């Protein structure tokens, strides 16, 4: 027999396994637990009252054994001589597609314009310390994709998209802390995720797959309505039975190439705004209603959302105990993102604070056609850069000054290593965007008293929340409607928004390829 129970405990007791086991047995009405197995399934925080609690959900196995766990890759077979599938992009969509293809009996050949996670660090150091942007290796491009160095958050609402638990288990198989299997809002940390991504690569290679770095796709070889090969800048040509496009939300050159080849792409709504940064202990006080964070409570996070003029304004990619980092993919633009290390022990908390950008309002402001949203995104990023001194210093403003339309005379300390300069962000942003963001902060402050404070800052610009382009595909076969054998995938194709959803999309695309090749 299996029973499921949920208990509520104070933070000081949450990791006392003897105590929580007994509480679970008591809740289940079991007096003698000597031959009973109690297994934690889910851990979450309830901070709605004055006292913060942990909610723990358990499965209790009575005269029954839990199913033994077997690592997923132990079921793989060598695919060295199997049908080939080229995957363009080594982010979560690409790597999980590769793992799924191996499981299904196909040979994945992964191509990435950037470098492996170890070599990529040097380019991140160059942009962090010197403001030098390598257009092929940066916070967005390279092994693991944008998520590798932006906290490794593993939360999604897209539970119907695929097997979340399989993605999490595969991360654990490759070195992630098993705690991610029980945390309601798991994360790995930007210091831990690179090693896990490298281990995934080794799995792909050990079972006969290929991974090629510094391999920038510059052309598609097509015949009639079918893709036959991809051609790379170094002259390499890769032929295969199917092709996955998993290039991420910032590979603008791929969008231009598709358009040039008359392969259908579409403009897509996205979100754009700023990154907002508070002191972490201040967010702790707002969220936990405590002057000092209790033992065993993590750095507090938040989610903020409201409607302004029938458009969404919301927080995005919230990084408790985190850092703001430069995420430009080309010289002449300022883009910022957030990341946290596994301990989330920075004294700062940051989050994207963005608003929905719809195609109809872009048209009203002169941005139309298939590249209208992308052009708008790029223009804002270039405006932010143009306001500075030609470096990767970012424009910033105190939050109250931004709301009131005033340039800040001083700026507080920040986690952004390259430094900030005071600028009128309400003028650097298009007026309809800045107006919504300013009103949004006021609205959020009504729900989260103190969110609007002179001690917090906004930094420009948070513009890579998602792709401004969609590469269309069929609802069932997931293949491009014009091009047989071409499977758009992940964030860059407009079908995902984070590590988990991109990974699940990769799995789904691999399964669609299996159906396609078996027909």
Image (cartoon, grey):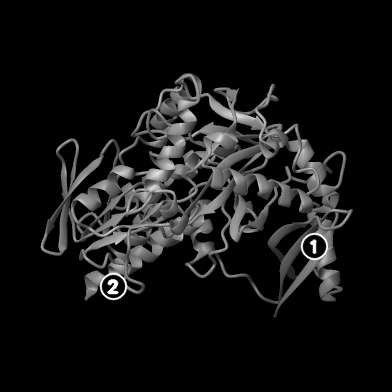
- Residue 515, labelled with which disc? 2
Question: Which residue sits at x=44%, y=21%?
Answer: 390
Reply above or below: 223 against 341: below
- Please tell me whether mark 1 or mark 2 is closer to you in this view: 2
Quick check: can you spot residue 256? yes
The local secondary structure at tag 1 comes to: helix
- Residue 93, labelled with which disc? none
Q: Nearer the viewer, residue 378 or 506?
A: 378
Residue identifier under label 1: 21
Can you give x and y, in whole percent of width and height, for residue 347 in the image?
Answer: 71, 32
The local secondary structure at tag 2 comes to: helix
Q: Is residue 442 toward the left or the right of residue 22 in the image?
A: left
Can you give x and y, in whole percent of width and height, for residue 403 in the image?
Answer: 69, 39
Which quadrant of the rendered structure holds the C terminus? bottom left
Question: Which residue sits at x=16%, y=41%?
Answer: 236
**Cα separation between marks 1 and 2:** 46 Å
Can you give x and y, in whole percent of width and height, for residue 50 in the image?
Answer: 89, 53
């Amino acid at each position: 027999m299996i029973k499921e129970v949920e208990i509520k405990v104070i933070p000081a007791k949450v990791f006392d396994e003897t105590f929580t086991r007994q509480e679970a047995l008591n809740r289940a009405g079991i007096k003698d637990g000597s031959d009973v197995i109690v297994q934690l399934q889910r851990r979450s925080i309830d901070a709605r009252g004055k006292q913060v609690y942990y909610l723990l959900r358990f499965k209790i196995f009575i005269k029954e054994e839990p199913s033994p766990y077997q690592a997923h890759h132990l079921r793989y077979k060598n695919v060295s001589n199997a049908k080939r599938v080229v995957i363009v992009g080594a982010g979560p969509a690409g790597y999980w597609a590769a793992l799924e293809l191996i499981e299904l009996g196909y040979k994945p050949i992964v191509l990435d314009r950037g470098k492996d996670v170890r070599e990529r660090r040097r380019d991140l150091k160059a942009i962090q310390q010197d403001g030098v942007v390598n257009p092929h290796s940066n916070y967005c491009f390279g092994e693991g994709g944008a998520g590798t160095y932006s906290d490794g958050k593993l939360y999604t609402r897209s539970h119907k998209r695929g097997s979340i638990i399989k993605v999490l288990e595969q991360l654990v198989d490759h070195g992630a802390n098993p705690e991610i299997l029980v945390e309601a809002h798991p994360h790995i940390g930007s210091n831990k995720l690179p090693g896990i991504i490298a281990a995934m690569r080794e799995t792909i290679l050990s079972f006969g797959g290929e991974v090629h770095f510094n391999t920038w796709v510059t052309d598609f070889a097509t015949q009639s309505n079918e893709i036959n090969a991809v051609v790379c800048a170094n002259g390499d040509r890769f032929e295969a039975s199917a092709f996955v496009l998993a290039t991420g939300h910032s590979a603008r050159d791929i969008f231009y190439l598709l358009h040039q080849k008359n392969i259908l792409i579409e403009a897509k709504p996205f979100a754009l705004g700023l990154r907002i940064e508070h002191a972490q202990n201040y967010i702790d006080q707002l969220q936990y209603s405590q002057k000092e964070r209790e033992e065993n409570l993590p750095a507090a996070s938040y989610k903020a959302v409201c409607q302004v003029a029938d458009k969404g304004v919301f927080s995005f990619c919230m990084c408790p105990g985190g850092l703001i980092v430069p995420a430009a993919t080309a010289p002449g633009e300022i883009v910022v993102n957030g990341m946290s290390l596994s301990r989330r022990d920075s004294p700062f908390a940051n989050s994207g604070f963005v608003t929905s950008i719809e195609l109809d309002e872009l048209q009203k402001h002169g941005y139309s056609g298939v590249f209208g949203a992308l052009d708008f995104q790029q223009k804002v990023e270039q405006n932010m850069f143009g306001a500075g001194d030609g470096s990767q210093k970012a424009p910033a403003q105190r939050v109250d000054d931004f709301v009131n339309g005033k340039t800040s005379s001083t700026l507080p300390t920040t986690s952004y290593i390259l430094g900030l300069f005071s600028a009128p962000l309400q003028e650097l942003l298009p007026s309809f965007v800045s107006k919504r963001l300013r009103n949004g902060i006021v609205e959020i402050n009504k729900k989260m008293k103190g969110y609007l404070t002179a001690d917090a800052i906004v930094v420009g610009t948070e513009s890579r929340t998602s792709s401004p382009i969609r590469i269309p595909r069929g609802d069932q076969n997931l293949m491009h409607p014009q091009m047989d054998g071409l499977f758009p995938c992940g964030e860059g194709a407009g079908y995902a928004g984070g590590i988990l959803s991109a990974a699940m999309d990769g799995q789904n695309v691999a399964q669609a390829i299996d159906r396609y090749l078996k027909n």
